[in-house]
Image (cartoon, grey):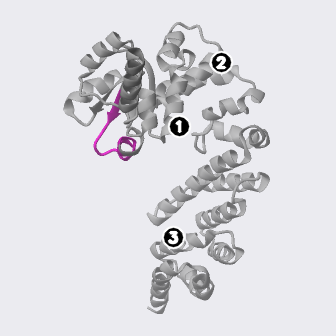
Amino acid sequence: MVKGILVWVLVVFQVSVFGQGINFEKLTLEEALIKAKTENKYVFVDCYTTWCGPCKRMTEFVFPSEKAGCYFNPKFVCIKLDMGKDDRRKFGEQYKIVAYPTFLILNSDGTVYHKIVGGSDIDEFIEKVEYGMEKKHSLGYLERRYEGGKMNKEELREYAFALRIANEKEQFEKVVKELIPLLSSKERVKMEYWFLLKDKEYGDEEVDFVITNIKALKRNVGDQIVDEFLYRNYNRMVQKYMIRFQNGALIDKENRKLIRIVLRELENINVKDKMQLIEQFQFIDAFLLEDVQGILKVMEQMVVSGQGNQKMIPRILSVVERRDDRGLMLGIITLKDKIMSVLPEKEQKMCERMIADFNRRMME
């Protein structure tokens, strides 16, 4: 009877402790390490700043959850460190903390067992921690294997993945350069190696690899993932050019050559919002060539084609406003009715003002 009561009390105690979110203790790192050694636990360190949005979301919505408490409290001594304080600089350098939030999982001797950078929801976060807690996936173990020069390509892949999760970019790039030559083209298009490609930007050899092997990657990784990767890269290029145009930057012939390469690529591959992107790059090409009629032709196409490029019109008008080309302004005035008919209501007044200004300049 007494034994049963004690078991019941213990269960209630554990539920009350572990079911109230993560128990972050007010301990120094040194105190937490000593406690972890005594209790045979690891130390979980939330390295945050007061100005970091993802840090706040983790503190407000993830750490207080019952699921978080049930997972972390039995396994870790948990502490928080405000990295915005001056005395944290040495700590940040020691553990290579350059982004927030950074989550350290430390052995009781203070060495790194695993490291995760960036916030997420509770299920994804626990999944990341559980994956890293398995020895063969942990950053600390993989670092020691790498330093010993004993890694095969599968271990190099694991190490590269752990480095990416830890946001250790310099070492990640170093390991990737060692790993890529060991892989065949058939291996590189597999899902397990997509993380080597997913963050690359147009101009990197890896993006060329994606374009060349788009069919195999879509088959292995998925149409949506590959489409979003390519669209993001092409769209980023468009935004960079539009910003430069709006700032009045002059573009050299090499840029014209690059745009034509992109247009040929887009003609030959299937990608999300392909025609929308083609129209945008056709505008950039015409603008680089200073081809007034070409610019106006593309603008009219954007207005009537229904490819979603109406949103580009206000930005194009702001570029024209800065350029002060009379032929271009006159052509836009003739397109006014078509332009205004497709613009969202909130953008009509601004565009109408700009076109009226073009008309005033033409009459001066």
Residue 124 numbered mark, or none = 1
Residue 262 image point, x, y percent: 68, 53
Q: Is residue 49 magenta?
A: yes
Q: Amino acid at mark 2?
A: Glu
Residue under circle 2? 154
Q: Nearer the viewer, mark 1 or mark 2?
A: 1
355 to the left or right of 268: left
Q: Residue at x 63, y 71 (%)?
A: 291
Mark 1 or mark 2: whose residue is earlier in sequence = 1
Q: Nearer the viewer, mark 3 or mark 1?
A: 1
Number of numbered labels in the structure image = 3
How far apart, in angstroms, are the residues tagged by discs 3 and 1? 38 Å
Q: Are marks 1 and 2 in contact (CB under 8 Å)?
A: no
Mark 3 or mark 2: whose residue is earlier in sequence = 2
Q: Amino acid at mark 3?
A: Arg
Q: Nearer the viewer, mark 3 or mark 2?
A: 2
Query: Residue reaching furthest left?
Result: 86
Residue 38 image point, x, y percent: 32, 10
Mark 3 or mark 1: whose residue is earlier in sequence = 1
Determine crowd level at label 1: few under 14, some 14-19, many 20+ residues with C-alpha closer than 10 A.
Answer: few
| Magenta range | 45-59
How far apart, in angstroms, are the residues tagged by discs 3 and 2? 48 Å
Instruction: Give the vertical position of 148 relative to 252 (above or below).
Output: above
Determine crowd level at label 3: few under 14, some 14-19, many 20+ residues with C-alpha closer than 10 A.
Answer: some
Q: On the rendered image, what quadrant is the C terminus found in?
A: bottom left
Residue under circle 3? 315
Q: Secondary structure at mark 2?
A: helix
Q: On the rendered image, what quadrant is the N terminus found in?
A: top left
Q: Nearer the viewer, residue 199 or 108?
A: 108
Q: State the image quarter where residue 75 is shown.
A: top left
